[in-house]
Image (spheres, rainbow, N blue to C red):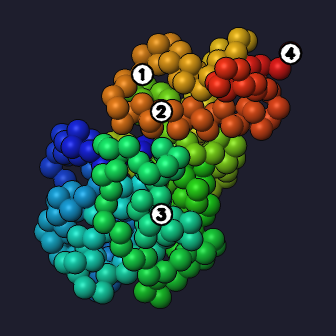
Amino acid sequence: MLYWFSKQLIVSWFKGCGILELTKIKGNTYYINAPTNIGVYVFKNKNCILIDTGINNSAAKKIDEVLIENGLHPKYIVNTHSHLDHCGGNIYFQNNYPGCLIYTSYMEKLFMENVELYPSMLCGSIPLKGLDRINKPFNVDFILEYGINKINDEKFHVISLKGHTEEQIGFITQEKVCFLGDSIFSSEIIDKYSLPYLYNIEDSIETLKSIKNIDADFFVLGHSDNIITKDEINSLVDKNLNNIENYINQILELLDQPLTKEDVLQNLVILNDLSMNFTEYHINLSAVSAFISYVYNKNLINSSIEDGKLYFFKKQ
């Protein structure tokens, strides 16, 4: 999910935040079930890795309280991607635990260290007022490579999960627990927010297919109340793929007649009963842009400019 930095979304984060607990998955791998799930890998000396950190300092403080209750010291942070609900707590941990090191992929590092990029991408210019509320930038210490990486002399497997963002990553512990970020959405999320926020549809489809082949026994989604088992992940992948396919088909059907990108969004909102405030409009328009790019680049649609408007329509 893409959480934009607004009061409404921060309130919704905390409404979904009950009593936070550290839950063991397997071996040294744990998680904290929060609106954004937080992975925790514990070393023998009680130092730990956090996989993602929540939406802001207040969320991070709640996570930290759980860590303190369990005698854990966050020494390392791995961010699956650069959306604020996954890395907004980084600054808290950097400030409160000097020497805490942050790891992510190359492209996600660029967005974390240059926080104006996301709102500028969304608007195609300097952001509109209301879309310019952004986190403070922070430094990323290490870029993770695909394959085996060592943290505190233990091995972890990093995989590409791009699509939702430019270079989202997955993180697999030695106990075969895989943290998937927002590469795949839970059934509850799809049922509630059916239009997926994806940067690249083709990459997202390939990533979803690749999840079926991940050598892991347990999967942790960015936003889900449940840990997904190996037996359950394939059906969830299929549900995500079917949801993407559904939107592709809806858009192609709509484009039997020429429509602007905004027209397509308007029709999808009506057909799927999507919520729309000022922020959600721009997020959903960006999602629609990704779908239109996908079908355009597949040569399924064409375009024309009439009276200063760009229309898209299905090829005959």
Give the spatial CA distance, label 4 vs label 3. 40 Å
- Left or right of 23 in this view: 206: right
Residue type at mark 2: give it: Asn
Give the spatial CA distance, label 4 vs label 1. 30 Å
Q: Disc 4 designates what residue?
A: 316
Residue type at mark 1: give it: Leu
Looking at marks 4 and 1 on the same chain, the residue that comes earlier in the sequence is marked by 1
Looking at marks 4 and 3 on the same chain, the residue that comes earlier in the sequence is marked by 3
Q: Where does residue 264 sit, x and y in percent of width and height?
A: 58, 21
- From the viewer's side, name the closer residue of 86 and 27: 86
Residue type at mark 3: give it: Phe
Quarter holding the C terminus is top right
Mark 1 residue crowding within 10 angstroms, few (<14) / some (14–19) / many (20+):
some
Give the spatial CA distance, label 4 vs label 2. 28 Å
Callout 4 touching callout 1 (CB < 8 Å): no
- The answer to whether residue 179 of the structure is visible from this angle is no
Q: Where does residue 61 sit, x and y in percent of width and height?
A: 17, 63
Q: Disc 2 designates what residue?
A: 284
Q: Which mark is residue 111?
A: 3
Give the spatial CA distance, label 3 vs label 1. 28 Å
SS assignment at label 4: loop
SS assignment at label 1: loop
Q: How many marks?
A: 4
Callout 1 touching callout 2 (CB < 8 Å): yes
- From the viewer's side, name the closer residue of 36 and 215: 36
